[in-house]
Image: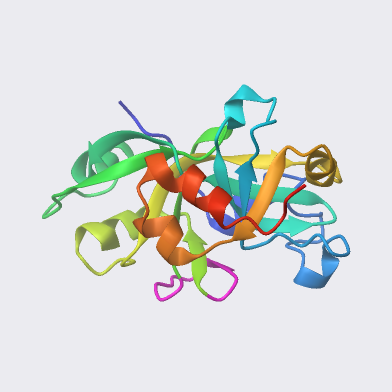
Amino acid sequence: MAWGRWVLVTFALLLLPAAAPERGLAQPDDSPAGQNLTGQLLIATPDMRDPRFDHAVILIVRHNKGGAFGIVVNRPVAREKLARLLEDLGQSTKGIDGSIDIYAGGPVEPDIGFVLHDAAYHRPETVAIGEALAMTSSPAVLRDIAQHHGPAKFIFAFGYAGWGPGQLEDELAQHAWFTAPADPQLLFDDAPARLWQDAIARRSRAL
């Protein structure tokens, strides 16, 4: 099975008008007053009515006046050999071994790949998500992982979740989501099957 394509993260964000206005990626002060959720977790409440996000936990990568962009972090769907993934992406597989878990990152653009990871790893196309987290969308990050000099902690996902202007704020007002700080240890070390329950226990917004 071919696992899709990659784009530079900055371009991937620009594919979604909700995530970035035409002038480019917004700075934190361009987010709605008191509502900047960049670097936070969205946790589906028991009242979530959209079956696509039932028990979902989402890391918000960008949030501004134009909308929001995030990656679902608790839905592993497959495990694939790194060599197969790189082959599907037209990359050399010489000396590549090992396997990687693949997550369903959201219903939008499900053929675009992203790697969420700790901030210690950085490439030119890497986008910071606060101080402790980052995201990279490039086949090179898979090669680095396969060669053991990639990020120490990571989640590899295809697809993302997106919201238009004011849409996420409306969903928060309708009690669809809790929020919580995006603790890297919770994000990368917790079992996906437990992540929703453990994130709920840390919620900072009880609507």
- Is 114 contained in the magenta span? no
Visual colour scheme: rainbow
Left or right, residue 166 beside residue 131: right
Q: Nearer the viewer, residue 118 or 51?
A: 51
Q: Nearer the viewer, residue 103 or 2?
A: 103
Residue 126's x, y, as percent? 50, 66
Residue 127's x, y, as percent? 56, 66
- Could you tell me which residue is drawn at 73 percent across and 57 percent down? 63
- Could you tell me which residue is drawn at 25 percent across and 69 percent down? 149
> Can you see residue 135?
yes
Q: Is residue 4 above or below residue 137?
A: above
The image quadrant that residue 177 belongs to is top right
- Is 124 contained in the magenta span? yes
Identify the magenta region. Answer: 119-131
Residue 203's x, y, as percent? 62, 55
- Could you tell me which residue is drawn at 34 percent across and 30 percent down? 2
Q: Count the marks: how many?
A: 0
